[in-house]
Structures are given as structure tokens and as C-alpha cells.
Amino acid sequence: MQVRFHGAAGEVTGSCHEVEANGHRLLLDCGMIQGSDEDERRNWDPFPFDPQEIDAVVLSHAHIDHSGRLPLLVKRGYRGPIWTQWATADLLKVMLEDAASLAEMDAERDNKYRRDGKTNHKPLFNHGDVARVLDQVRAIDYDQPKKILGGVTVTLRDAGHILGSASVEVVADEPTGRRTLAFSGDIGPHGTPILRDPVPVPAADLVLLESTYGGREHRERGATLDEIKDVLDHAWADQGNVIIPAFAVGRSQELLYWFARQWDEWDMSRWKIFLDSPMAMRVVDVYGRHETLFDEDAQEVWNGRPHPFKLPNLHLTPEVSQSQEINNIRGGAIIIAGSGMCNGGRVRHHLRQNLGRKQAHVMFVGYQAKGTLGRRLVDGAESVRMWGEEIRVNAVRHTVGGLSAHAGQSGLVDWYGQIAGRPPVVLVHGEDDAREALATALDRKLGATVSLARPEMTVEV
Ligand SMILES: [Zn+2]
């Protein structure tokens, strides 16, 4: 068995690894590169393999940096199955349809405004390509080995990262013997709300391990909740709004979960809460169909009052006009909107309205990739450019790191440490400083042999 790294090899986004197993070729993930415009242009590049020669795809979870180039893969000739967990299959529909709409809008805008003589910009992919992807999806359960190709079996383990997220175990019975590859996918932290804790792969000959937060530890959950309470109290005292840029999948629902759970303690009834994300609303429906995947605490919260998705002061604003009406509110509103890194979506409108206000608060609750507006704001930019306008940032910024959907360094080390035999590790899905820190920790604590994936590098399993 062999692995070749095509994406998330020296960066966080664009997860894509090609595995040769018992003479077959499969892809683990086919994700989109996200970040600056320059980074995102690489999504148009040809794949470094022929899509028609891939026999199967296994998708770890629905996040676009893991799934976003699947429509392109299909558009360029891939006709095989896409294996993934049931809830991921449901979320994938929401994610990819949204991505297709964005791609179509981008192309339309380019055709309208570009003055370079080229007016026939085509979207990266369209809704038809997405429909094909969804046709090719084959959903499976956690912990049930599935033979997907001759002599190749995959098992998905709950990764506790987002609903339906999985670590992937690939077992190949090759002429020279049995080889096992463990791909972590994205690993969630212990005690993440709603979801169960990550389930490790029992044994492997090689491990591909994510390293997003390989150089950091998250704050304790309790301290994080105190921090959120402080931000809310501070904003209430300032009579400002709280803007929360949040991923539509996972983070938006978790925030509502915490609001329900801490209802009295955080005095939540005083606020107007807006979930201003049509996509997050669709994801709320998906959660409703997969309550069996919830952990015990979540099942309790779901049976109690108020229900996280039916808070008495929660306003869902699917229509653009409803979203625009929020602009008239100068204080007392909590606005949850996407995109999570502020590089698109309705949150940009709310930032434009609120960034200049001293009494406004912006609370970052997720990862901000290099090159994004969110990252510039987190890094303390005094002003930012939006729609050709320079906006001075007077709003108070807060980074609440402890809500991350990714395990911190010790969580990653623990996940790896439970795999029998301490197999060699290749670190993927992280910037270099994070990977180097994690490599040092894995070596020091567990004596692991660690290497860092580079684009187009090949390793033997
Ligand atoms: Zn993810």
C-alpha cells in the first residue's frame, strides 16, 4: 500500500490523499483550497491524477476543505462510489449545493464586472455536478467494516469533529500481506458539545494525522464558557451588538446549544438572537434527523427547555430582506452568520454595519485561515477594505479559542497514543509551525517516528 499527498500537505485546507491498495486507487477526501484569492485559484488546477482512474473515494466529513472539489472530480470524469457516513451524506448535500451557488454567483459577477475582455467565465462547477456527486454517494455506519474494492475494506470511526465526521481505517489484503492505514480526518476535542468523543483506530501500520492545532492547547471548557459570558455581559453593558462569524455546520448549532444550556446563567432571554444563515438553518434540520449520534448530555438538553433550535427569542432570517432589517438594530442583538472566516456570506454585511462602532463586539469562535478577512481582524487590523471601502475597526474583538472543533495538541497525541504498535505518523492538515510542534510532542511523549507530508510526496504503508 502507498499514499501520495495531493492536498493539505503543508497547509490546512484542500485535504486530498491518494491511496494505492491492492492494485486499486482510492482517494481520501477531495477538498477545496480555502484562503486568499491566490490560494483559491489553485482549485481550478488539473488534478495531479486522472479522475477516471480512481476506483473509489472515501470522504471523512462534509467540511468543504475535505469535500469541496468532489463536484469537480465528477465533472472531470470520476464515476465511482463516494463512501461516507450517513449524516455526512446529508450534510454534503447542504454544503455542496451552497458551494455551487457561490461558484455560479462568482462566475456571474466576473462576467459582469471584469474589463479584461474575457466575459465568459464559467463556474468551477454547477448544481448539475453536485447532483451527480450526491448520486454517487454510498452511506455507511460507523464501526461497520465495508468491503469497497477487491481486498480493500474501510471502517469509519466517529471522529467527534462535526456531525457524521469520521476517521478512516483502510485495510488492504495485498499479495505481500495485510496492511492498515489510519487517516484521522479532523479530530474533535474531548467533551465537544452535542457529539460523542473521538473513537480511535485500534491498530495501523501508518497513520495520517491532522495537526490544525498541533502547536496549541485549548482553554478548559469552563473557562471558555466564562469567556463567552463575559463577552455577552460586556456587550450588553456597552449596548452594542455581538457579531459571531460562525461556520454553518457545527459551530452555529453548538452556539444555540450553549445558549439553551446556559439560558439562566447567561441571562439569554434579554437578547434578540438571529441565526442569519439559510445554510445553518438547513443544517439544523439535518441534526434533527441524526439525534442517535448525539452524546448523553445533548440528548438531555434536547429533551429539556428551552430547545436549542426553538429558543423563544431566536429569529431565523432566511430571506435577504429579513437579513437586511437586522441592519437597523444598533444594540441588543446577537447575530450568528457565515461565513466562519468572513470571506463571504451575510456576516460581511453585519461587519460592515458594526465594525466602525465602539459599542459593537465581534466574537471569533472558529479557525481563521491565513489570507481571510477573519484572520486580518483577529490579527488586529486597524482598518479593513470591504466593497472598495476602507472601514476603521472600532468594534471590540474577542477570540474564543476553546470552542474549536479540533483537538488541541494533547488530544491529538492521546488519539494517536491509543493506536496499537505506535506506527509511524505523517502529519497533514496543518501549517508548518503547528506540525513541527506536534512532531516534537509525539516524539518526546511517545517516541513516535514522525514526518511531515509535502505535496506529491509518496510514502509506503
Ligand atoms: Zn473539518
Image (cartoon, rainbow, N blue to C red):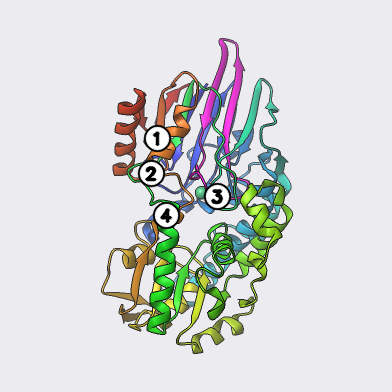
460 or 326, which lies in front? 326
Residue 152 left/right relative to 20: right
Q: Is residue 236 above or below residue 413?
A: below
The tag earlier along the polypeptide, 1 or 3, is 3
Type of amino acid at the residue the image marks with label 3: Arg
Q: Which residues are magenta?
A: 162-191
- The answer to which of marks 3 and 4 sits earlier in the sequence is 3
Q: How many marks?
A: 4
Q: At 38% from the left edge and 34% from the top edge, which residue is drawn?
A: 453
CA distance separating discs 2 and 3: 19 Å
The answer to the question of whether label 1 and label 4 lie on touching residues, with beta carbons closer than 8 A, is: no
Label 1 Cα neighbours within 10 Å, binned few <14 / some 14-19 / many ≥20: many
x and y, in percent, of residue 159 in the image: 56, 41
Rendered position, 142 above or below 382? above
Could you tell me how far apart the alpha carbons at marks 1 and 2 are, in whole angstroms?
8 Å
Q: Secondary structure at mark 1?
A: strand
Q: Which residue is mark 2?
A: 430
Furthest-bottom residue in view?
328
Mark 1 or mark 4: name the one nearer the start of the chain.
4
Dot 2 amino acid type: Gly
Q: Amino acid at mark 1?
A: Leu
Please, what secondary structure does the residue beneath circle 4 have?
helix
| Discs 2/3, front | 2
From the image, tell me which residue sits under label 3: 69
Q: Assess whether residue 183 is covered by the magenta stretch.
A: yes
Q: Give the residue number, with chain letter if any, for mark 1.
A: 427
Q: Which mark is residue 418?
A: none
Point out the frontmost of discs 3 and 4: 4
Q: Amino acid at mark 4?
A: Gly
- Between the residue at mark 3 and the residue at mark 4, the CA separation in whole angstroms equals 29 Å
Q: Are marks 1 and 2 in contact (CB under 8 Å)?
A: yes
